[in-house]
Image (tube, rainbow, N blue to C red):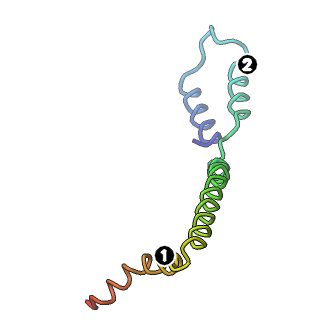
Amino acid sequence: MKSEELRKKLIAIARANPPGEQVPLSFEKRVMALISAAPMQDLWAAWAKSLWYAAGPCVAVMLAFSAWAFFHSRQNPSIDLAQQLNSTLLAAVDQNNNDSSW
């Protein structure tokens, strides 16, 4: 809830219920100052922070798989990992092309 909407709702409720004698002097001003001073949570900043935390492990996994692919192709030059990856990724497309239902 935005602070301006909350302020308007609190003022409407306060006008409907007049304060009693037990309420301290300028209590409403202290409450309103605390509401306006409260920091608003920025959801975009939280999302960006989470993505930056995830970037490090993603780079580490990418480097590990790249090193594995490089050394695997050095040990077995007859196996082409790029061709195997290409055929795996395009298997669904090739299967759909054979079934011409359009």
**Residue 41 image position (x, y, % from top left):** 65, 42
**Residue 35 image position (x, y, % from top left):** 68, 31
Q: Earlier in the sequence, mark 1 or mark 2?
A: 2
Which image quarter is the N terminus in? top right
Tell how many labels.
2
Classify 10 Å Cα crowding around label 1: few (below 14), some (14-19), many (20 and above): few
Residue 8, picture quadrant: top right
Q: Nearer the viewer, residue 86 or 68?
A: 68
Residue where numbered disc 1 is placed: 85
Of marks 1 and 2, the one in the foreground: 1
**Residue 28 image position (x, y, % from top left):** 68, 23
Image vertical order of residue 85 relative to residue 36, above or below: below
Residue where numbered disc 2 is placed: 26
The residue at the far front in this view is 75
Residue in view at x 53 percent, y 27 percent: 16
Residue in view at x 50 percent, y 81 percent: 83
Which image quarter is the C terminus in? bottom left
Q: Nearer the viewer, residue 96 or 49?
A: 96
Image vertical order of residue 83 relative to residue 66, above or below: below
Image vertical order of residue 68 relative to residue 50, above or below: below
Residue type beneath disc 2: Ser
The secondary element bearing badge 1 is classed as: helix
The secondary element bearing badge 2 is classed as: loop
Instruction: Tell me the CA gap for discs 1 and 2.
Output: 71 Å
